[in-house]
């Protein structure tokens, strides 16, 4: 059995999967509301714990065999110092022979495919949810500002709620990530397209990296 830390665990979906084989998982996130959902989701699991914490500064007196940071958490580290501080957190908590697994937006693909407006719509007999994303691209900074408008229609109560969110995301080339990882004693063992295991290309928006000491 392994000890895992899940950085940016959100509502605990990945943490729950990672604990499925009896592994111990510690999930951390900055969002209290998401952590509440995670705790409720995994309330019957004694091998999962959730704590509030920032990827850049969280510290606990434990070492882990595996540290994961999934669903583009690293893209929220929009400055060099943010990224360095997150790697320091990983370095502090990872066992000497541990591995670090994360995914991110891949720069060649972002520049090739370009961020575009998208609409996602889901509904059932009770509710309709429409999410509209309008990105603003700042290629000189490797930044995409993603503006979300989420329209929720309650069909039973004839009520509509609109939620607006802005997510500032930084995309990376593998070379800049490798440079910082190497400065903390990590080597990249795997670099592949997310979930497919294909070689990264200019059409590969999501990349997964496995790094180790």
Image: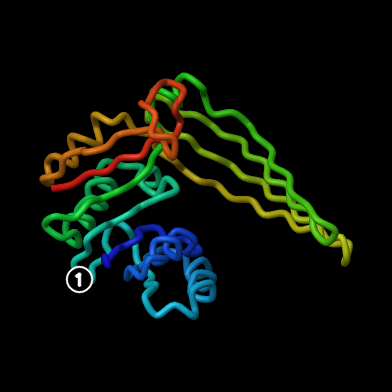
Q: Residue at x 49, y 74 (%)?
A: 42
x and y percentages locating residue 66 in the rendered image: 26, 57
The quadrant of the picture occupied by the N terminus is: bottom left
Image-based side of 211 in relation to 55, left or right: left
Q: Residues within 10 Å of mark 1 (few under 14, many from 20)?
A: few
Q: Position of residue 183 (x, y in %)?
A: 12, 41
Pick whichever, 39 or 32, lies toward us. 39
Instruction: Give the vertical position of 153 relative to 61 (above or below).
Output: above
Q: Which residue is mark 1?
A: 62
> Which colour assignment does the render follow?
rainbow
Q: How many numbered marks does the figure carry?
A: 1
Foreground of the two, 45 or 70: 45
Snapshot quadrant of residue 154: bottom right
Identify the secondary structure beneath mark 1. Answer: loop
Q: Is residue 156 left or right of residue 45?
A: right
Q: Quadrant of residue 210?
A: top left
Q: Is residue 39 left or right of residue 47?
A: right
Say which residue appears at 30% left-offset and 34% top-offset. Answer: 191
Residue 160's place in the image compared with 183, above or below, is below
Query: Residue at 63% of width from left, 32% of height from top?
Result: 117
Q: Quadrant of residue 115?
A: top right
List x then y, in percent, for residue 177: 25, 36
């Amino acid at each position: 059995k392994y000890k895992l830390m899940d950085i940016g665990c959100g509502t605990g979906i990945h943490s729950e999967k990672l604990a499925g084989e009896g592994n111990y998982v510690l999930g951390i996130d900055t969002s209290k509301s998401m952590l509440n959902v995670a705790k409720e989701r995994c309330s019957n699991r004694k091998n999962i714990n959730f704590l509030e914490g920032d990827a850049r500064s969280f510290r606990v007196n434990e070492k882990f065999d595996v540290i994961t940071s999934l669903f583009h958490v690293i893209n929220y580290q929009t400055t060099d110092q943010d990224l360095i501080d997150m790697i320091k957190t990983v370095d502090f908590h990872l066992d000497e022979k541990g591995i670090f697994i994360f995914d991110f937006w891949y720069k060649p693909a972002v520049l090739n495919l370009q961020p575009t407006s998208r609409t996602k719509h889901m509904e059932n007999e009770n509710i309709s949810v429409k999410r509209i994303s309008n990105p603003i691209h700042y290629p000189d900074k490797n930044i995409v500002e993603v503006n979300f408008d989420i329209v929720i229609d309650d069909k039973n109560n004839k009520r509509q709620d609109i939620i607006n969110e802005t997510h500032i995301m930084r995309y990376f080339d593998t070379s800049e990530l490798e440079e910082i990882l190497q400065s903390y004693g990590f080597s990249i063992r795997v670099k592949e397209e997310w979930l497919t295991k294909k070689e990264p290309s200019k059409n590969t928006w999501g990349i997964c990296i496995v790094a180790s000491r």
